[in-house]
Image: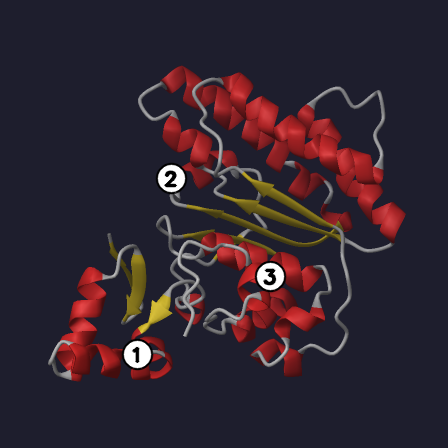
Amino acid sequence: MKYPIGLQSFEKIRKSGQTYIDKTDMVYQLVTQGSYYFLSRPRRFGKSLLVSTLEAYFSGKKELFTGLAIDSLEKEWASYPVLHLDLNSQKYDDTQKLEAILDWNISRWEELYGSYEQETTLSLRFSGVIERAYKKTGKQVVILVDEYDKPLLQAIGNNELQADYRGLLKSVYGALKSQDRYIRFALLTGVTKFGKVSVFSDLNNLQDLSMDEEYQALCGVTQDELETIFAEPIKQLATKYKLSVEEALCRLKERYDGYHFVENGIGIYNP
């Protein structure tokens, strides 16, 4: 078995034949039963992989899902315009850094869908891109925001900078409400829920999945998945170190760097 340690790209994992624990039945349920979601999980808990999986799905890349649960569930495999905003990679020590990454992403989308000179603010430009993406493609837009709260977390202790970040992000994310008629699906992920209260205070259409039992295993690895999918490697580990299977399982959970488990609905992070 090839383990995708550190990989966050669903497409790369599937094309390179690495182990992927199938969560696509829950992905299908998400996209067919709702439109606006928020998910909070600790870092390195699979949020980015989930976002990447949704991006591949909404891009209509059916070949990547061959053999997975969604392969037999989805019949249409339509392609939608996807706006993927990843706030995880930047260091946000001043407002200009946040404005720069937002501008860079919006500029890329404007190259695809056009722009208007009258759209002079980031929020107006984002709203304009959503509308034009819909009108150009004839398909509603998919918006995926990974680590929405990264700027806010890096500004903890600096109340003035926190206020600036909240104001800027709130105005940009406000497009999810004002341009609702053009949006097919939206998912915003982050580490915290405290920032959600202020940044998304105008968005009363976000369904919070963070403590939803139905989606508790959407990210991470469950005890059952660990014991079934990794049964043979665990047996090999036990034999190699002359341990019982239970001891090997316990050792794996204690020693595996950065792995995550879900037990009884509770996410456990083993640093």
> Which residue is at the front of the view, 268 or 235?
235
Task: Give percent across and percent down for residue 133.
Answer: 81, 45
Q: Point out which mark residue 11 bears.
A: 3
Q: Is residue 98 something one can see in this rendering?
A: yes
Q: Say which amino acid is labelled 1.
A: Pro
Q: Say which amino acid is labelled 2.
A: Phe
Q: Say which amino acid is labelled 3.
A: Glu
> Which residue is at the front of the view, 90 or 25?
90
Q: Point out which mark residue 233 bears.
A: 1
Q: Secondary structure at mark 2?
A: helix
Q: Is residue 126 something one can see in this rendering?
A: no
Which sits earlier in the primary sequence, circle 3 or circle 1? 3
Describe residue 238's horizontal placement relative to residue 106 as left or right: left
Q: Residue at x 83, y 30 (%)?
A: 115
Q: Check if mark 3's residue and mark 1's residue have beta carbons within 8 Å.
A: no
Q: Is residue 110 above or below residue 59?
A: above
Q: Residues within 10 Å of mark 2 (few under 14, many from 20)?
A: few
Task: Give percent across and percent down for residue 233.
Answer: 30, 78
The residue where tag 2 is placed is 194
Closer mark to the observer between disc 3 and disc 1: 1
> Which residue is at the front of the view, 267 or 100?
100
Cα gap from disc 3 to disc 1, whole angstroms: 24 Å
**Residue 64, quarter of the rendered image:** bottom right
Q: How many marks?
A: 3
Q: Secondary structure at mark 3?
A: helix
Q: Secondary structure at mark 1?
A: helix
Q: Residue at x 13, y 83 (%)?
A: 244
Describe residue 253's horizontal placement relative to residue 88 as left or right: left
Task: Give percent across and percent down for residue 79.
Answer: 77, 61
Which sits earlier in the primary sequence, circle 2 or circle 1? 2
Q: Residue at x 58, y 72 (%)?
A: 29
